[in-house]
């Protein structure tokens, strides 16, 4: 009695094979057939969440299925990212990778629950936000050359504020110290807001921050921008050089937000998601929303994005070791 269903299955498999298909490939050809979950490893309302929601809405339209954002914040993004790493690689659970989750966390958390370079399938880097180094106008330096000379003449007298130990701004500050061979005092805060307020008040002399939050104060003369961490000068600050222009190419830290999936995602689903995401990033409406955040759409290949993540991890491990940064 049980042989007939089995024979039917074998016959179907034979037919797929004769057509040059395998059962998984046949099933994947209709992807997606149900809603997709997009895991955001940070709470709702932050920049990562906003970028995810901008992309999710249009990505769902491209794929013909809803893309539902699932916020799983905590531990600097490690909780949500660890959850994604263990999800089934069928294309129905995707996630957002950031400079924190896939650049800094692997370098500063010794007991991380995931491997940033092995436990995920890259799809594309969605957007990047330049970071900027600025100083209080009271500092007796007008450009990077004079600032470095001042810092070298007064080791550990000048202080920089960060969003906290192991944050992007902390790692950028330590990377700057290594590259410029200067000694600066690190003052960690609970978030970038308090650090920015103290930089404006002159309680700390230096701030490493993402451009959107510092820009109004730079334009208003309350902060003096020395350099931007970006591949080229940014339109909002055309007279501010990049770190590379100043002979500090290693200081290239930027905030970025990429689309990833668990490891071993089938290649055809990876390709379909990459193509759909790139179409979304090219939409004028999406571009406008991202640019309002100070972000630039990227849309690269999965291979290029994977190389970026590997380079970020290696760079941050070097910085963490030199600065002896380790978080439990």
Image (cartoon, rainbow, N blue to C red):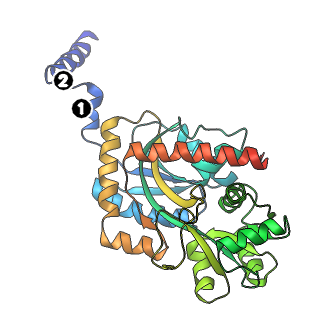
User: Which residue shows up at 47% across the image and 64% down it?
Assistant: 51
Along the line of sight, the residue nearer the viewer: 274 or 249:
249
Q: Residue 313: give x, y in percent of width and height.
A: 60, 44
Q: Residue 140: give x, y in percent of width and height.
A: 76, 81
Quadrant location of residue 177? bottom right
Along the line of sight, the residue nearer the viewer: 191 or 230:
230
Query: In screen coordinates, is 133 left or right of 323?
Result: left
Quadrant for the N terminus in the image? top left
Image disc number at residue 41 = none
Determine if residue 26 is in view: yes
Indicate whether 98 appears above or below 119: below
Q: Residue 34: give x, y in percent of width and height.
A: 34, 47
Instruction: Determine the secondary structure under disc 1.
Output: helix
Indicate whether 20 appears above or below 317: above
Along the line of sight, the residue nearer the viewer: 64 or 134:
134
Quadrant for the C terminus in the image? top right
Residue tagged by mark 1?
A: 26
- First in residue order: circle 1 vs circle 2: 2
Query: In screen coordinates, is 224 left or right of 194?
Result: left
Disc 2 crowd rating (10 Å Cα; few below 14, some 14-19, many 20+) is some
Instruction: Determine the secondary structure under disc 2.
Output: helix
Q: Do the residues under discs 1 and 2 have CB atoms within 8 angstroms?
A: yes
Along the line of sight, the residue nearer the viewer: 110 or 79:
110
**Rounded to the nearest whole Å, what is the CA distance between mark 1 and mark 2?**
8 Å
User: Which residue shows up at 77% across the image and 75% down it?
Assistant: 205
User: Which residue shows up at 72% across the image and 38% down it?
Assistant: 111
Residue tagged by mark 2?
A: 16
Determine if residue 64 is in view: no
Query: In screen coordinates, is 185 left or right of 5?
Result: right
Disc 1 crowd rating (10 Å Cα; few below 14, some 14-19, many 20+) is few
């Amino acid at each position: 009695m049980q042989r007939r269903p089995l024979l039917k299955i074998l016959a179907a498999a034979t037919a797929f094979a004769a057509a040059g298909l395998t059962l998984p490939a046949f099933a994947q050809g209709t992807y997606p057939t149900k809603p997709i979950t997009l895991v955001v490893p940070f709470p709702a309302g932050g920049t990562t969440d906003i970028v995810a929601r901008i992309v999710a809405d249009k990505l769902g339209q491209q794929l013909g299925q809803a893309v539902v954002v699932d916020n799983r914040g905590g531990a600097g993004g490690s909780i949500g990212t660890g959850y994604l790493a263990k999800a089934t690689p069928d294309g129905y659970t995707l996630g957002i990778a950031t400079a924190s989750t896939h650049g800094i966390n692997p370098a500063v958390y010794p007991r991380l629950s995931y491997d940033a370079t092995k436990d995920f399938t890259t799809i594309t880097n969605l957007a990047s936000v330049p970071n900027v180094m600025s100083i209080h106008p009271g500092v007796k330096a007008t450009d990077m050359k004079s600032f470095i000379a001042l810092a070298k003449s007064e080791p550990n007298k000048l202080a920089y504020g960060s969003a906290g130990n192991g944050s992007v701004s902390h790692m950028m500050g330590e990377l700057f110290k290594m590259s410029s061979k200067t000694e600066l005092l690190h003052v960690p805060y609970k978030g970038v807001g308090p650090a920015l307020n103290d930089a404006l008040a002159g309680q700390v002399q230096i701030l490493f921050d993402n451009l959107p939050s510092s820009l109004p104060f730079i334009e208003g003369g309350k902060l003096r921008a020395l350099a931007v961490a970006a591949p080229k000068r940014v339109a909002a600050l055309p007279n501010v050089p990049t770190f590379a222009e100043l002979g500090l190419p290693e200081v290239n830290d930027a905030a970025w937000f990429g689309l990833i999936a668990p490891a071993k995602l089938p290649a055809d689903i990876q390709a379909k998601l990459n193509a759909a995401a790139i179409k979304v990033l090219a939409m004028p409406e999406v571009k406008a929303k991202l640019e309002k955040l100070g972000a630039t759409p990227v849309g690269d290949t999965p291979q290029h994005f994977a190389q970026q993540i590997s380079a970020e991890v290696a760079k941050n491990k070097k910085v963490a070791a030199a600065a002896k940064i380790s978080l439990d």
